[in-house]
């Protein structure tokens, strides 16, 4: 039982490059989330998926796209990375209105 | 618009002392109020949570106090220990919505 698994753990991108952050959970969560964490800003919601096949924008969606591939997997894509997207990204999942479990995070640097 | 306001931003407490972190929310539809603890390099993990039908919940040294009329809730850590040094986040959500987090409090417990 791995919980919530994110890959990669670290990534350095050049401005304009694209990449996809992967997230998979084996906890039978209906809902999955992507947050970014920046110093002094807390955890800000990028996108979330309340159920398989649905996605909704959060507080800071610009520059990102998501795919809820199936119940287990929720990916975050940066089409054209910018230095402002340098951050630590966390994926999380839960069943409705209950404890959310977080992955270990992806530390992304855009140069 | 920040829906969950957390204070203080940082806190230094002597070993054995009481740590108090406060949060205020705006959305009266919120019905789930968790506190998360995060150690460096790790994802946040649920510490304790409360729903608005009770005014207080205690788990070991950790207590949530909830004031529905004031739209405020707080975390009290009794007999604070160096191992409690971490970043603490309050959060809030309602059924079917994503967790909205405060900006976090960095707690340092000095020995």
Image (cartoon, coloured by chain):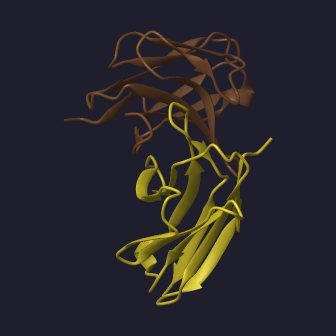
Chain colours: A brown, B yellow
Q: How many marks?
A: 0
Which residue lies at the image location 37% right of the left edge and 25% below the top edge?
Answer: A30
| Direction right: furthest residue | B1
Determine if residue B54 is in view: yes
Residue B104: image x %, image y %?
Answer: 63, 57
Left or right: B12, with A107 as reference point? right
Question: Could you tell me which quadrant the C terminus of chain A lies in?
Answer: top right
Residue A93: image x %, image y %?
Answer: 41, 33
Which residue lies at the image location 43% right of the left edge and 49% below the top edge?
Answer: B42
Left or right: A42, with B98 as reference point? right
Q: Which image quadrant for residue A58?
A: top right
| Direction left: furthest residue | A1
Determine if residue B39 is in view: no
Task: Say if A23 sits above or below A90 in the image.
Answer: above
Task: Say if A24 sits above or below A35 in the image.
Answer: above
Which residue lies at the image location 68% right of the left edge and 28% below the top edge?
Answer: A85
Q: Which image quadrant for residue A72?
A: top left
Depth order, front residue of A31/A26: A31
Which residue lies at the image location 50% right of the left edge and 29% below the top edge?
Answer: A33
Task: Say if B38 sits above or below A9 in the image.
Answer: below
Left or right: B34, with A99 as reference point? right
Question: Could you tell me which quadrant the N terminus of chain A lies in?
Answer: top left
Depth order, front residue of A58/B37: A58
Q: Which image quadrant for residue B87?
A: bottom right
Residue B15: image x %, image y %?
Answer: 48, 88
Left or right: B58, with A64 as reference point? left
Residue B48: image x %, image y %?
Answer: 42, 61
């Amino acid at each position: 039982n791995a919980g919530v698994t994110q890959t990669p753990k670290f990534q350095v991108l050049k401005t304009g490059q694209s990449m996809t952050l992967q997230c998979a959970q084996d906890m039978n969560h209906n809902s999955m989330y992507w947050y970014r964490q920046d110093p002094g800003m807390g955890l800000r919601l990028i996108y979330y998926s309340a159920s398989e096949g649905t996605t909704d924008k959060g507080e800071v969606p610009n520059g990102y796209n998501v795919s809820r591939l199936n119940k287990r997997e929720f990916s975050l894509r940066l089409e054209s990375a910018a230095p402002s997207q340098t951050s630590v990204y966390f994926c999380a999942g839960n069943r409705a209105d209950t404890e959310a479990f977080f992955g270990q995070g992806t530390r992304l640097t855009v140069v | 618009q920040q829906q969950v306001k957390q204070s203080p931003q940082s806190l230094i407490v002597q070993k054995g002392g009481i740590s108090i972190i406060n949060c205020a929310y705006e959305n009266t539809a919120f019905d789930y109020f968790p506190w998360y603890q995060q150690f460096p390099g790790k994802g946040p993990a649920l510490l304790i949570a409360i729903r608005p039908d009770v005014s207080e919940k205690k788990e070991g040294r950790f207590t949530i106090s909830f004031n529905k009329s004031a739209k405020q809730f707080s975390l009290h850590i009794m007999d604070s220990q160096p191992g409690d040094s971490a970043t603490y986040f309050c959060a809030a959500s309602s059924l079917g919505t994503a967790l909205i987090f405060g900006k976090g409090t960095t707690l340092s417990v000095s020995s």
